[in-house]
Amino acid sequence: MVRVRLKLPSSEGRVARWLVAFMTLGFIALAAAAIAIGWITVRNRTYTAEILHTQDVRQAVATVQILMEQSETARRGYILAGKPLFAAAYARTAGNLVPSIRTLRHLTHDNPNQIARLALIEPRFIQLRAFRTQSMTLVASGRIAEAQRRFAVDASVPLMRGIRYRLQAMAADEVRLLAIRTERQQRTSALFLSVAGLAAALLLIVAILAVLLIRRYTADLAASRDSLRTLNETLEEQVVERTADLSRANEEIQRFAYIVSHDLRSPLVNVMGFTAELATAAGPLAELVDRAEAEAPHILTEDARLAAREDLPEAIGFIRTSTQKMDRLINAILKLAREGRRTIAPEHIDPAQLVDTIVGAMQHIVDDRGAVVRVERPMPAIVTDRLALEQILSNLIENATKYLKPGRPGEIVVKGHTERGRVILSVVDNGRGIDPRDHQRVFDLFRRSGAQDQPGEGIGLAHVRALAYRLGGTIDVQSTLGDGATFRLNLPTHMTIQDAA
């Protein structure tokens, strides 16, 4: 004799309480990971800014070097050839030298070594500029021979050599700083990836633990419903025994649902509350930073400004998003559990009229998504629970409008026929379809197929299958990728209260 049993420890749901305790630790670990990610993000941003600053300094040093060499080349060309072309080139490059040196000094104001080198470069540059001006003036006045004689004996060459040597030293120092800062950034990036991976693993573990027990119960209930449907009516004793087992299983599910709604939600509410307090506290902190920036900017660091205005709100948003997602998952679990307690009330139903009502209620959604829903008449009448059948068909039709194939107008057809004493209701669409490998998994709790570009938690089809089982039926899908999908709901023609027990 086959029995369907959902086993919980007899000592007041000991396993469930362990699960809740572990999930609480998971939430605490996720909060810690979120704080760590926020801190790492601040450090990484600082290192990135330092790298960019180093690149700017290197570019400024290179610019001064190039201008220094170009202006000297133009000066020598003018002395040798006396052509105005060299005079124009000298005027252009020499005119850019002073602002370039000023820019370099501004960029290196926080580096004592570089400031010391600039302090040696600038007086040499002033002397060199005096020699250059003298040469250019003599050539311009036609005294080329005198300009050449003075150039041969002035100190331009050693001055240029000294300037060139110190500019090269500045560039080498920036290369060294770039290597150090790049290594820091790489270490920070690796740490960020490690912490993010750990947070994702923790979230996955928490979700898996929350789902495992419910999936076990749901699978056992599905198996029991299939077995009961195939029993011979003369085996009344087995039916009674299995019905009793199912009742006990439903009671166990309800007890677990209470644990989920109370013990599991309690730490979640605490996290959400503390997150709200953090968000509230962030406002005065930002105001304090604004006030410090206005009244005493010297006491305010860039790290503190970024932490108050960007990093703290970003970390709070991450925590809030995670807790909201877990809240939706808990609500979905409770919805499935509560559905099992509702009393089934069979009545005569015209499926075509029911579909018309459903489509009328969601017509604005259908129109917004560019789809058309058509009902093929006649459809066979059925005796079943109206609310459960309405929920099943609503979910299937809405899914069909949600997963349309881009570039193709959506067309959904609802039809029905009788087959061996049962009613087959089909929802056919021309959407993007479902991979054959996912035909069974789409009905599992929290499982979805294809690109996850639509909102949802993977609850709808699991709910549909649970309702179909409660109505004494089954549901399956036939589909290939790109060619739409057909969902077939197989129900008894006349359901009785005993069938729903």
Image: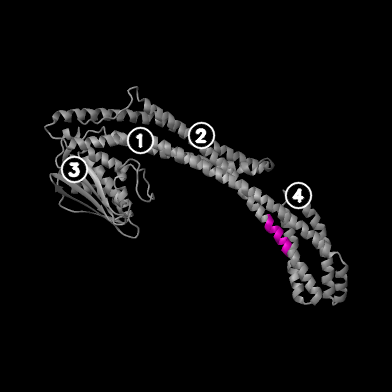
Question: Dot 1, crowdedness within 10 Å: few (<14), some or many (≥20)?
Answer: few
Query: How far apart, in angstroms, are the residues tagged by discs 4 and 2?
Result: 47 Å
Secondary structure, mark 1, is: helix
Q: Earlier in the sequence, mark 1 or mark 4?
A: 4
Kind of residue at disc 2: Glu
Give the amino acid type for the residue marked by disc 4 in the picture: Asn
How far apart, in angstroms, are the residues tagged by discs 2 and 3? Answer: 52 Å
Residue behind mark 2: 277
Tell me if mark 3 has few (under 14), some (14-19) or many (20+) residues whose alpha carbon lies within 10 angstroms of its own.
many
Outermost residue toward the left in this view: 234
Residue placed under numbered mark 1 in the picture: 212
As measured in the structure, the alpha-carbon distance from the residue carrying label 1 to the one carrying label 4 is 62 Å
Choose the circle earlier in sequence order: 1 or 2: 1
Q: Is residue 144 above or below residue 111?
A: below
Are circles 1 and 3 on residues that touch, CB within 8 Å? no
Answer whether residue 59 is magenta in the image: yes
As helix, strand or loop, the secondary structure at mark 3 comes to: strand
Q: Secondary structure at mark 4?
A: helix
Q: Earlier in the sequence, mark 4 or mark 2?
A: 4
The structure residue drawn at horizontal position 37% and vertical position 31%, both measured from the top left corner, is 260
Locate the N terminus and report the quarter of the image it occupies.
Answer: top left
Residue toward you, 371 or 113: 113
Which tag is nearer the camera, tag 4 or tag 2? Answer: 4
Q: Which residues are magenta?
A: 57-66
Q: Residues within 10 Å of mark 2 (few under 14, many from 20)?
A: few
Q: Which label is found at residue 113?
A: 4
Q: Is residue 202 above or below residue 477?
A: above
Q: Do the residues bearing badges 3 and 4 touch, measured as CB atoms within 8 Å? A: no
Q: Where is mark 3, residue-wise?
A: 491
